[in-house]
Image: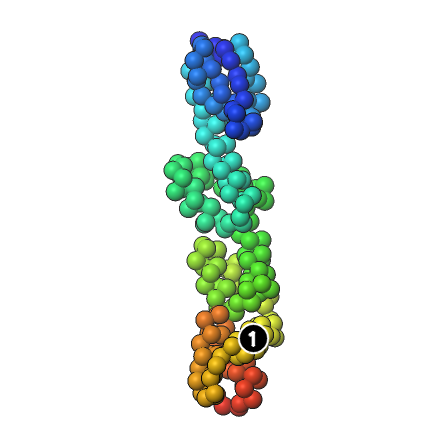
Amino acid sequence: MKKITKIEYQKKNKERFNIYIDDEYGFSVDISILIKYSLKKGMELDDALVDDILSSEEKISVYNYGISVLSRYAKSECELRLKMKNKGFEPQLIDNAISTLKERKYLDDERYCEMFINDKINISKHGVRKIKEALYYKGIDKEIIEEKIKNISAESEEERAFILGEKKLLKIKENDNRKKMAKLSNYLIGKGFEYETVNKTLRKLLNKNDDFY
């Protein structure tokens, strides 16, 4: 049997503890593992118990990494999985951590999708097409994207395009209306607006009735 001869805080992380076995450093654990196994000085450990403790420590390490990432930036499930994979964690441990994070509502692709759409509409004023492309890239399920995108009205889309177009028009130094229209339409398309919305915006801004496409 092995005996715990010393337990100490880690200097840089008070939530972690160094466990010394028979006067030599053995391993470190999260505070939750310390509590779960009631680890204390003088406690005897057999090999099976040590293995169980280390297995639990591996699981909580992946979970804590996920919490750390999500506390800094909102992430989709796909993005978080990739970061965990790149960190070198085992697939099964990643699955366990992701499952727990979802159960505790720390990871929620529907909520993430809603937040992302709101930011892109209200801050960046992107069009629907660009927003959808970004969400696909982040690995959000297609059904979730389509459901949340439905909440963006055509009126809202046209209003954002007009606001952006009006500001951009003031910066375009062209006397030729055709060149001005081309630059403005390219700008709005780049912002993710559909051709129909761009056409309507150009007509309003340039007092034209032509169909430019």
Vertical side of 156 occupied by 119: above or below: above
Percent of width and height locating residue 74:
54, 49
If the image is split into quadrants, where does the C terminus sit? bottom left
* Residue visible at 45% across and 79% down in the picture: 183
Residue position for label 1: 167
* In the depicted structure, whether residue 160 falls above or below residue 205: above
Q: Quadrant of residue 122?
A: bottom right
What residue sits 52% from the left and 28% below the top?
12
In the image shown, does 67 or 147 lie closer to the viewer?
A: 67
Amino acid at the residue labelled 1: Lys
How many discs mark residues in the rendered view?
1
Give the quarter of the figure containing the N terminus: top left
Q: Position of residue 161 (x, y in %)?
A: 55, 74
Q: Nearer the viewer, residue 209 or 206?
A: 206
Query: In this orientation, does residue 200 appear?
Result: no
Q: Residue at 54%, 79% (x, y): give it.
A: 170
Give the percent coordinates (x, y) of residue 114: 58, 58
Pick whichever, 185 or 66, lies toward us: 185
Image color mode: rainbow
Looking at the image, which residue is at 58% across and 22% down?
35
